[in-house]
Image (spheres, rainbow, N blue to C red):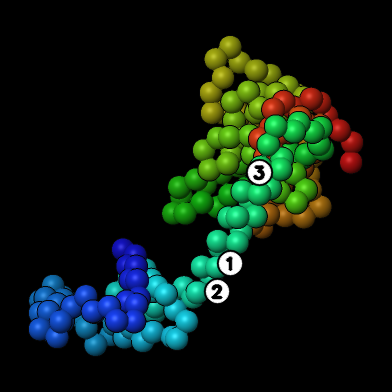
Amino acid sequence: MTTIIKRPRKGEMPWLSEKERIRAREYLISAGYDVDRMPKLIWPDDAVSATHDNPYAPWKFTTRSDVLKARKERMEHCLWWKREYGIIEIRALYVWVFWCPGISGIFEGLWTYLIGIGREYCGGGYKGQLNGRHLERVMELFPLVDKPLIPDWRYYEQWRERFVKKYPSKTKWCGKPQGKAPVWAKVKGDHIEEILGRAEW
């Protein structure tokens, strides 16, 4: 369980009084926690918040510069979106099929993305995975498997496996082969409007 603590500002009262801290400590001991093993929270000068993944994990701090950097990145992305919004360009993207190791077996398997140079286009889908009409269009452009009357997950999985073999990349991803092949697409901002056709490297 992740714990997030915001640092009190100067002049603000701490959340717990000394009595409340003693009670909290006693409660943790009664719940079976080894309080002496828990890292003490010692604030660096420029830290604004602290997090840790479990009571025995070391504290990780977010600094003012981290907050300012994240704010600047959000502003730049908003400005980029305002500049790019409504402008449709024809761009060369590439279909990327790669192995995802997942977390404890969740999300494990082959995934399909559409990638642009300098930024990522995914065309929607869960966790950025290409799906729906864009995936159907890509599979139409790279016909590697006969489409059944009622497509199911095995059809898409078989297509991904064959794509990796037919269009192998020179490098590996997570220690496994990956496939890449270029396509032309109409792109508006970071959204794919339409996949036009295959391209050449």
Q: 53 or 48: which is nearer to us?
A: 48
CA gap between label 3 and label 1 equals: 18 Å
Q: Secondary structure at mark 2?
A: helix
Residue at 79% over, 25% down = 196
**Left or right placement of residue 159 versus residue 28 in this view:** right
Residue lying farthest to the top in this orientation: 149
Residue 9 lies in what quarter of the image?
bottom left
Q: Is residue 186 left or right of residue 70?
A: right
Q: In the rendered image, which residue does mark 2 sit on?
A: 65
Q: Quadrant of the N terminus?
A: bottom left
Considering the numbered disc 1 on the image, is that residue within a helix, a strand or a loop? helix
Q: Position of residue 29 (x, y in %)?
A: 14, 79
User: Badge 3: how crowded within 10 Å, few (<14), some, or many (20+)?
Assistant: some
Between 32 and 16, the one nearer to me in the picture: 16
Mark 2 residue crowding within 10 angstroms, few (<14) / some (14–19) / many (20+): few
Q: Residue at x 56, y 19 (%)?
A: 151
What percent of the width, then of the height, locates residue 120? 68, 46
Q: Is residue 48 above or below residue 154?
A: below
